[in-house]
Amino acid sequence: MRLYLCEKPSQGKDIAKVLGAKQRGDGCYNGAGVVVTWCIGHLVEAVPPEGYGEQYKHWSIEQLPIIPEHWRVEVKAKTVTQFKIVKQFVGQASALVIATDADREGEMIAREIVELCNYRGPIQRLWLSALNDASIRKALGALKPSGETLPLYHSALARSRADWLIGMNLSRLFTVLGRRAGYSGVLSVGRVQTPTLKLVVDRDREIARFVSVPYWAIEVTLSASGQSFVSSWLPPQGCTDDAGRCVQQLVAQQAAERMRAAGMAQVVSVETERVREGPPLPFDLGTLQEVCSRQLGLDVQETLDIAQSLYETHKATTYPRSDSGYLPESMLVEVPAVLYAVLTTDPSLRPLIDRLDRTQRSRAWNDSKVTAHHGIIPTLEPTKLSAMNEKELAVYRLIRAHYLAQFLPPHEFERTTARLACGGQALQAIGKQVIVAGWRQVLATPEADDADGESQLGQVLPPLHEGLPCQVDLVDLKALKTLPPKPYTQGELVKAMKGVAKLVTDPRLKQKLKDTTGIGTEATRASIINGLLGRGYLLKKGRAIRASDAAFTLIDAVPAAIADPGTTAIWEQALDMIEAGQMTLDTFIAKQSNWVAQLVQQYRGATLSIKLPPSPACPQCGSPMRQRPGKNGAFWSCSRYPDCKGTQPIESLAGKHGAPRKRRAASKAS
């Protein structure tokens, strides 16, 4: 019997359909000599410290470091039934095809089962980038040998075990040290979550330290040839800050008065350049999350869930957890089929589709830039827009537009910069004249501008030439103030995680972070942010996220190396070496174990300086309250729980005391 081991039931159903395995069984599909079953994600998990000994149930520095001699996994309580089904089929299989998601994590999900079930038969790998029938058939005809993807498993196992060593040991270490200093919460430490948290803490501190500085600007409305346009005053040197803003009010006032008195300006020079812009790339997941956060107001996890639904349920788009927006050149032959599917899905696109140049090859088609996965694009088969909800439809249209943009002409415009003199003052006017709309027909959006650093300049200048006089219609002196940095939104935090290389000084580590697209992966960034929200380290403030007092406490307590994204770069280098066969799993774990042991030894006698957040009084009995984790994040709970079930929102951590509220303590204050 040939067994196909998938990651999720929906994936199993799609593959079984193509294989002709139509008979639905308990946790599987059956066909002639074929069984398709699934894992429901990870069926097993790493054993926690207490699984290695009763003594580890109590958190104590004396027991650290905890370094397993023989690593163990156990079946998750929630998935015991499905594991038994999978184990039975693995035991009966004469050949096994791994059909989990085509990435490092998907490899680990399957190989953990193979190891735990002691399967020793032949293995092949199904490598899918889309779940429509055509893509599945194509992948089934090109199965990879087991050895080709086995290093992915070793790399994933290295990451998982090293994360365990960091998380279990250092979370216990700093939580115990925190309790000695009077802090009652858990100080959770992680290789990715801690440097991510530091990004928010640093931004919030930058905002708190910011001192607004006044400056002055002048907008002058001019007219020539019967057409008005706006110019900006260029303040003289000696009265400006580093950004070229005038910080001397008297200078600005005098300039405004002189220009009003002059009544006329004269063109000094005019320069026009033709700019040609290619389209932005198809989406990788991180960029999709950024754009959906900014344009649609979606949380990063919500965007991932929608992209996963478009991939799994609607079969409308390709694999979502991609870290590359590029497309393999071999997929150029599929362009007609993709465009036909898009048109069949939405016939209203006929006028646009007819204008596309199907032979056009944008910069997106580049084999050297494609990683394990290519950019997220529409699939080869039509889908039903009516089956999508409003948010799914909005995300699908974004993905579709980025693909269609690859076959439209470049966006071309003329950018004119005019310098003028008025009352002894210098003015500058910038205009933009669109020559060819090109791909902006489908992507006339702010993120399209951001993609190539070119903003919509907004005004068309009248015909100008050197020496031309222009009438001064209005001189508007503006008193302004510098603004602090904005708090992160979830989408901007994902962008910062991807671009964290700019914060690293070591050139080799900086390059590594660029090569690996920063800290975290496309598959994990949403869960990292959600985890920080759930632990109460991050707080939602509208669309912004802010650091709680607990976050400042943690970042100030942990070693700099733990919060440094450069550490992640070093790890990623090692994981790449494991994947390439240049380092063994055991060597890597031995190095990580030694490092953790050194950190424990270095900090076991440390005294933490902790600013304790004010503990509000219980709204029901007046007793002090304590932080507790809940399904929707941390919250304040009465210290007398369960005798008193008073609670209060976590927002009080940041100095905003919300109205008291009651929760059902059985689920919220456990």
Image: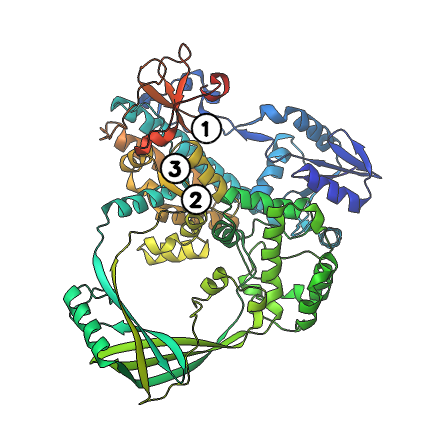
Mark 2 or 3, nearer chain start: 3
Secondary element at image label 1: loop
Please tell me how crowded label 3 is: few (under 14), some (14-19), or many (20+) other residues with Cα within 10 Å. many
Mark 1 or 2, nearer chain start: 1
Contact, mark 3 vs mark 1 (Cβ under 8 Å): no
> Of the residues shown, which amino acid type is indicated by label 3?
Leu
> Of the residues shown, which amino acid type is indicated by label 2?
Arg
| Numbered circle sitting on residue 543 | 2
The answer to which of 570 and 654 lies nearer the viewer is 654
| Numbered circle sitting on residue 523 | none
- Residue at mark 2 to residue at mark 3: CA–CA distance: 12 Å
- Residue at mark 1 to residue at mark 2: CA–CA distance: 45 Å
Along the horizontal axis of the image, is 435 left or right of 426?
Answer: right
Position above or below: 465 against 232? below
| Numbered circle sitting on residue 69 | 1
- Whether residue 406 is visible here, answered yes or no, is yes
Along the horizontal axis of the image, is 542 left or right of 94?
Answer: left
- Whether residue 524 is visible here, answered yes or no, is no
